[in-house]
Amino acid sequence: MIPHGGTEGSVDQETAAIDFIQARFPTAVLAVAESSGQKWIEVARDQIVPVLTALRDEQGWDMLMDLTAVDYLGMETPERFQMVYQLYSLARNSYFRVKCWVPESDPTVDTLTHVWKAAPWAEREVWDMYGIRFNGNNDLRRILTPFSYEGHPLRKDYPLQGRGERNQFPRYEK
Amino acid sequence: MGLENWSPEGALTTRVEELLNWGRANSLWPMPFGVACCAIEMMGTLSSRYDLSRFGAEAIRFSPRQSDLMIVSGRISLKMLPVLQKIWEQMPEPKWCISMGACASCGGIFDTYAMIQGIDRFVPVDVYIPGCPPRPESLIDAVIKIQELVKLERLDSHA
Ligand code: SF4
């Protein structure tokens, strides 16, 4: 069994995945990087679904562990938001990370609804928390905050204590 | 019981109010609103080691319509507060509320957009328990304080 998380065997598999994407989608690769012994790849936003589908169908990265976003507000990054896709191979017990940048002016990404059944709810969470829309996800309702909530609280410019939502309830007397 | 010696006729007099309150105070039926770590202490209080049934309050009801003491143990989020209020409304009068732990009482360490900063802003609380989490002894103490409150009830309190 290959232990997961930054081991040599894991890095080999990450390298193989990166080589595969570079050969198969040469124009999609924006960057390859490594940190804490884990390699990942940044791909173009419009290629994210084909890249992930190919990783699943041809490279055995069969499970979408997680799909989330990061807000790099005020940092020197290509765009404000970044989508992070965490893949897992059940057969090899190893992880691989794919990222893509999402601009603030057009915070949309194509949905993975038709690729993984795990995707729709994770996408709802990203929509709820970061306000990134997923083209093709027809059920993009809020999932953590109440449906009536306004704003996307994990955006870095959202005030930590909210905008008074937590005080707007009727008061019950005895 | 020796009662027959003390009262050979087999009768004693009291006030209806007092009899009702005595019965109520010693048979509280809690509605456990356990939503976080404090609920674990509440469960501990109810089970054999601390044994809340010694105080007559072990008949935990998961139906608000059958209970008269709401124990809010845990943090209440924006999304949970309407549920809490609905359950509070469904409990028949007379009813009491314990706010258990720092989170329920004031938001605790969670001073964020998602958290209610003290349930007493939106539902009436009778007894607060400090602590994170409070020990079972504190909850027992709170139940005893509720019993004292119950004994102050008047027949016309909820007319
Ligand atoms: S007061 Fe402490 S133990 Fe109780 S719900 Fe809050 S964090 Fe958990």
Image (spheres, coloured by chain):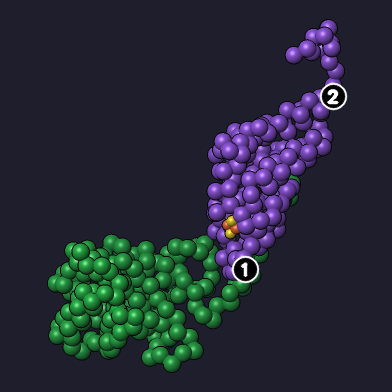
Chain colours: A green, B purple
Q: Is residue A90 visible?
A: yes
Eyeballing the image, is A158 above or below A60? below
Under circle 1, the secondary element is: loop
The residue lying at 64 percent from left, 70 percent from top is A164
- Asked if residue A110 shows in the view, the reply is no
Q: Look at 73% across and 48% down and name the residue there.
A: B127
- Determine crowd level at label 2: few under 14, some 14-19, many 20+ residues with C-alpha closer than 10 A: few
Q: Which mark is residue B111?
A: 1
Location of residue A55 in the rendering, given as x and y in whole percent from the top left corner: 19, 74
Q: Nearer the viewer, residue B105 or B16?
A: B105
Residue B136, position as x, y percentages in the image? 63, 45
B19 versus B42 height, above or below: above
Q: Which residue is mark 2?
A: B15
Whether residue B20 is situated above or below residue B120 in the rendered picture: above
> Which is more toward the observer, B106 or B37?
B37
Give the mark nearest the N terminus, 2 or 1: 2
